[in-house]
Amino acid sequence: MLNVLVVGAGQGGLAIGFQLLRERVDGFAIVDAAPAGQRGPWNTYARMKTLRSPKEVTGPDLDIPSLTFQSWYEAQFGAAAWKAVGKIPKGMWAEYLGWYEKVLGLPVEGAAPVVAIHPHPDHVAVEIGGPAPKTLYTRQVVLANGIDGFGRWWMPDFISELPEARRNHACDPIDFGAMRGKVVAVLGAGAAAFDNAAAALEAGAESVHIFVRRPEIQRVQPFKQLSYNGFLRHMGDLPVPLRWRFMRYLLTLREAFPQETWDRVTRHDNVQLHTGEGWCDARMRGDRVEIETTLGRFTADHVICGTGLEIGAGHRPELAPFADRIATWADRHPPAQEVPRLGAFPFLGDTFELLPRDPADAEALARIRVFTFGATMSFGPSGSSINALKFGPGRVVRGITSALFAEGAEAHLDDLMAYDTPEF
């Protein structure tokens, strides 16, 4: 029986692992579906050149100076080289996380996807697939399995019904070389949509057309205003109605992308931005895709959807069997019922634990904690933002150590009463 199983060895899962070490929690393991070097988005579907955060932002180091990216970088290339860095190259961030895992000696097993989770009042059984399938038994589970770890990547049904060779979501493995000389249509106004548009342009697409349903693209990045300790540490302490007002505003406004992303796209002459033009339908016309937009028809050779996530435990195969037992924001805060996209987020307890719809499920569900984008409505960008990583792991692990101590309290009392070592 493990004390803790962390699902996911990206930056969030590794930071949770480090905090467990700092609290002297033994008997824990970290599993990830991907092998070393492929964990997180950095070497897979993240198609930006650099991180979007300023290089000075810290997080996974948990305030240990020698564990920061800057210390790691300066140890190899020197302080002068660090001063010359603009933003952190994404591949280098992946290298840093690999070093972080190694230098801390974190117990990570790769190529070990979680295929099923079975919560019980006294433990959680977790089925692992991959080349070495097995079942692990643990007292606590932390879901730190990426931005889509509590939902799925979403695209309109009329796009997903097109042949796979003619469409992709921005998170898919994409052969951009195959787009040379092609007309590519991209749906979405966010950074992922523009990053994929840039990748197609750089691969030699004949033209790239970006479609945005809003009349203007978002130029303000609201999370920049919120990069202060009060919000990042304490948003989850606010009364529920106030938390709802914060997050409804933020997640309705959406995020802007940085200047570098805009420049990377607009330096090409063969790109066109279609604002105020959403997609209504699509079909194949011969070997090409005919898209019905709000302003007419457009024909492309390939389409890419940068349309983000759909949150909901029911979309995750490992969570779906008990998804209807998990309390959501729509269950606990009636105004959230008016915004189904946000109402589907899990309503989490004080230390990121799942809460039940039926009190009879409370003990079993409380053994599972969510440290992904799914925690955003309850705690802000705690499990999906580098600069929030210094705050979330402490809160998660505080809940774990509290639960472990309470679970063994009778035995601890017996130990106390049996203790008779004299001082002299």
Image (tube, rainbow, N blue to C red):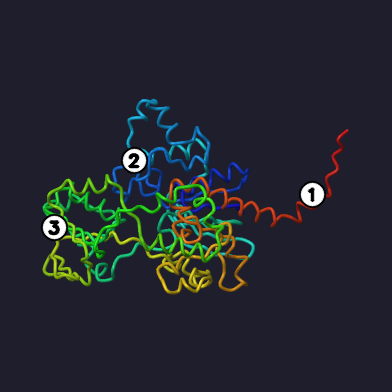
Among the two numbered marks 1 and 3 on one chain, the one whose residue lies closer to the N terminus: 3
Q: Residue 57 location, x and y as percent? A: 43, 41
Among the two numbered marks 3 and 2 on one chain, the one whose residue lies closer to the N terminus: 2
Check disc 3 and report the residue beneath it: 183
Residue 145, quarter of the rendered image? bottom left
Q: Which secondary structure lies at badge 3? A: strand
Q: In this view of the protein, which residue sits in the foreground, 362 or 330?
A: 330
Give amino acid for label 1. Answer: Asp
Check disc 1 and report the residue beneath it: 415
Q: Is residue 312 left or right of residue 288?
A: right
Give amino acid for label 3. Answer: Val
Q: Residue 282 location, x and y as percent? A: 19, 70
- Residue shown at 63% from the left, 43% from the top: 24
Q: Name the quarter where the N terminus is drawn.
A: bottom right
Among the two numbered marks 1 and 2 on one chain, the one whose residue lies closer to the N terminus: 2
Q: Which secondary structure lies at badge 2? A: helix
Distance of label 1 from label 2 (alpha carbons): 50 Å
